[in-house]
Image (cartoon, rainbow, N blue to C red):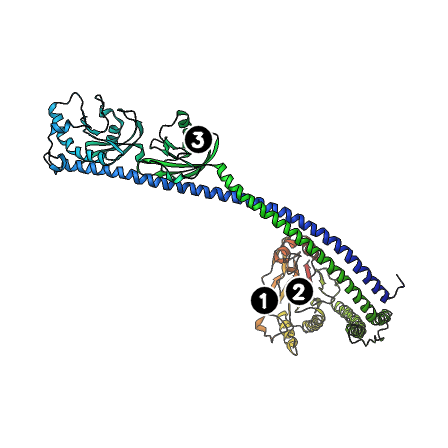
């Protein structure tokens, strides 16, 4: 393999690759197809289960809605029948009020038909009861009014089979009734629930559950209402009706296995529909009443519609209840849940059948696609093999030429050129390598020139730094013959050469000139400007000028031909070593500190302006005079001290400088500068120095 030609390798690789692709793809395709088949089967079953579940839920929901609709329909039918009875009650009350108001008289032919009282009372179906304590006069007067409504009772009972009796009772107990069945002689209306409840409700209709008749023990429904005139109860009218008045039969449940039941105002189930005959059963057994009471009624709220499920007589039921608005009656419709399941089973069977068809179709489709994919893979492998043979024949030569040229480049023979004339990407690649060799050769030459230039520049900086250091005074033992004072200074440039400066020398036997300054900018230009400024300061000081005059004269000289507008800020002064008198002048520089009585404080100096960028006048500067005492110390610095930054971007600031000086109350000039330098180093830590740092200290001994 190592010595095999590129052409043969291409052929070999393209033979192996199609075979591997063919075998691997075939295996993977078959595996994926069977996985897809399994996935389809599982997915179909899951979808079927979900569909069955959703179908059951939907059918339950629909059944609930249908049951409630059936209950509403039957309740509406019952409501219409009950309103007919209520309308008859309303007409009777209106008639009796008209009688009380005198609109009708006993001899009115429309109502008594020419009959006298004795004849009317002797007719069939007319019954009168009264308490024994009533006098004949009270009875006669009461009957005169009551019997005027008799014909209305008679006509209502005669023309409506549901009415079996109507009666009217006065508050004193006198009772007149038209009834198909005799009224017992001991019948006392004042003890009857229909009389007492009507009195209590005072004008509202009172309904009562079906009760056996006192005459023939048949179930009757009773409703009653008091006749109220001017807030006074004048009488109570009662109507006995057959239960069929409420509902003879529940036609809406025919053809289903549902059954209906009727709830009376008392909250008890009083009738149930027979599932087979669909007739209402009004006499329920005690066991059935108890079952309704325990399993059905606790879930019903009278007056509200509701759907719920329960177990009744061992059967699971879905129940809907709807109220009949007048009288707090209600209708319930119940259906066995197994009926719902039976209907759902048919839908489920259809879904499962559809699932089987779907899975079978999917399996057939997968098998067909598997054969198609295998054919595509085989054909593709043949095509790839033919392409590999063509590539091996046509790209071998250009690749060999590229290989030869690249080896020459690897030997650093960058003048060698790759010659390919295939008019394709290989030719472009060869030309690219040729261009790269030319550019690389050029970059190597440029790199050599840059390295040489950097070496020359570095040497120039070193020379400039040596010159700058030579211009600054020696601080080791500057004036060993003078013990009147001690002076020390140091400068730490931010680059190879700095822009800060300091200087001190005697202008005569007793006057020491000193200065400190900060040049604008950094690097070589600042160093050159610093050397020029320092030379001019020395010249002006040696000529005997005062500090303010020195700054003015130096500034005006530097301003000439200053195209870069460079300048410096600085302080210069004269110290009389015999008297301790100091004259200071400030050119836009930070004020110095004075240590006296073991405390450092900043000296208030009147700042002038920067020196070198603008023409200056003496009026722009002033002299600050001090009288140093024995042990007093002056501390001068550039803004590189207070503007030193740490890694968080925080400045050292004047407050930290003052705190550091306060800790050095008894130190000599050198110790003071070393202490401040340590404080700055501790603050900045590993942060790079951003500006030149220069400090100078003078201690007066007297």
Q: Residue at x 78, y 55 (%)?
A: 23
Question: Percent x, y for residue 73?
Answer: 37, 42
Q: Which residue is mark 3?
A: 295
Most foreground residue, 449 or 73? 73
Q: In which quadrant is the N terminus drawn?
A: bottom right
Q: Which residue is mark 2?
A: 576
Q: Residue at x 82, y 75 (%)?
A: 420
Q: Is residue 150 left or right of residue 637?
A: left
Figure quadrant of residue 691: bottom right
Q: In which quadrant is the C terminus drawn?
A: bottom right
Give SS at disc 2. Answer: strand
Is 123 above or below relative to 420?
Answer: above
Give SS at disc 1. Answer: loop
Q: CA distance from mark 1 to mark 3?
A: 104 Å
Question: Percent x, y for residue 4?
Answer: 88, 64
Q: Which residue is mark 1?
A: 607
Q: CA distance from mark 3 to mark 2?
A: 120 Å
Q: Residue at x 35, y 30 (%)?
A: 282
Identify the residue at the far left of this view: 107
């Amino acid at each position: 393999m190592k010595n095999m030609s590129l052409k043969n390798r291409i052929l070999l690789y393209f033979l192996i690759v199609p075979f591997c692709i063919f075998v691997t793809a075939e295996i993977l395709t078959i595996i994926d197809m069977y996985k897809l088949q399994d996935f389809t089967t599982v997915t179909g079953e899951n979808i079927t289960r979900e569909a069955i579940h959703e179908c059951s839920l939907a059918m339950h929901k629909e059944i609930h809605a249908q049951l409630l609709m059936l209950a509403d329909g039957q309740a509406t039918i019952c409501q219409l029948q009950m309103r007919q009875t209520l309308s008859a009650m309303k007409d009777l009350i209106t008639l009796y009020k008209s009688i009380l108001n005198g609109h009708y008289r006993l001899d009115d032919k429309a109502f008594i038909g020419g009959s006298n009282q004795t004849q009317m009372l002797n007719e069939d179906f007319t019954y009168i009861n009264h308490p024994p304590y009533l006098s004949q006069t009270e009875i006669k007067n009461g009957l005169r009014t009551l019997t005027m409504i008799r014909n209305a009772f008679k006509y209502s009972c005669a023309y409506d089979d549901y009415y079996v009796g109507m009666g009217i009772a006065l508050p004193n107990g006198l009772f007149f009734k038209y009834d198909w069945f005799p009224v017992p002689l001991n019948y006392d209306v004042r003890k009857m629930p229909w009389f007492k409840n009507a009195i209590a409700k005072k004008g509202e209709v009172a309904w009562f559950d079906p009760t056996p008749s006192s005459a023939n023990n048949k179930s009757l429904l009773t409703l009653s209402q008091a006749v109220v005139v001017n807030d006074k109860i004048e009488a109570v009218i009662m109507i006995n009706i057959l239960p069929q008045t409420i509902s003879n039969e529940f036609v809406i449940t025919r053809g289903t296995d549902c059954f209906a039941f009727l709830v009376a105002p008392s909250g008890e189930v009083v009738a149930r529909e027979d599932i087979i005959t669909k007739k209402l059963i009004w006499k329920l057994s005690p066991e059935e009443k108890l079952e309704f009471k325990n399993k059905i009624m606790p879930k019903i709220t009278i007056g509200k519609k509701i759907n719920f499920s329960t177990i009744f007589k061992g059967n699971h039921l879905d129940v809907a209840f709807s109220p009949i608005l007048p009288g707090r009656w209600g209708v319930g419709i119940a259906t066995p849940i197994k009926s719902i399941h039976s209907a759902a089973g048919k839908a489920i069977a259809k879904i499962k059948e559809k699932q089987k068809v779907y899975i079978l179709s999917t399996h057939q489709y997968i098998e067909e696609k598997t054969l198609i994919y295998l054919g595509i893979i085989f054909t593709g492998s043949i095509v790839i093999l033919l392409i590999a043979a063509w590539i091996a024949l046509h790209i071998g030569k250009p690749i060999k030429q590229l290989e030869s040229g690249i080896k020459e480049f690897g030997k650093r023979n960058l003048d060698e050129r790759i010659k390919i004339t295939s008019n394709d990407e290989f030719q472009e690649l060869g030309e690219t390598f040729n261009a790269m060799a030319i550019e690389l050769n050029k970059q190597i030459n440029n790199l050599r020139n840059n390295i040489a230039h950097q070496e020359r520049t570095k040497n120039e900086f070193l020379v400039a730094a040596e010159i700058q250091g030579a211009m600054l005074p020696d601080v080791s033992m500057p004036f060993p013959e003078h013990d009147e004072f001690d002076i020390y200074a140091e400068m730490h440039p931010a680059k190879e050469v700095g822009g800060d400066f300091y200087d001190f020398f005697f202008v005569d036997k007793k006057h020491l000139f000193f200065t400190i300054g900060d040049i604008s900018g950094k690097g070589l230009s600042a160093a050159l400007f610093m050397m020029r400024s320092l030379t001019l300061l020395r010249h002006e000081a040696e000529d005997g000028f005062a500090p303010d005059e020195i700054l003015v004269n130096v500034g005006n000289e530097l301003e000439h031909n200053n195209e870069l507008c460079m300048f410096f800020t600085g302080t210069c002064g004269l110290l009389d070593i015999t008297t301790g008198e100091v004259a200071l002048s400030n050119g836009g520089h930070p004020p110095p500190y004075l240590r006296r009585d073991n405390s450092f404080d900043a000296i208030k100096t009147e700042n002038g302006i920067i020196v070198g960028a603008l023409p200056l006048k003496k009026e722009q500067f002033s002299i600050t005079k001090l009288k140093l005492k024995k042990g007093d110390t002056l501390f001068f610095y550039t803004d590189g001290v207070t503007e030193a930054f740490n890694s968080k971007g925080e400045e050292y600031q004047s407050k930290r400088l003052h705190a550091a000086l306060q800790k050095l109350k008894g130190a000599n000039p050198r110790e003071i500068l070393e202490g401040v330098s340590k404080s700055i180093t501790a603050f900045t830590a590993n942060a790079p120095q951003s500006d030149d740092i220069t400090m100078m200290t003078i201690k007066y001994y007297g």
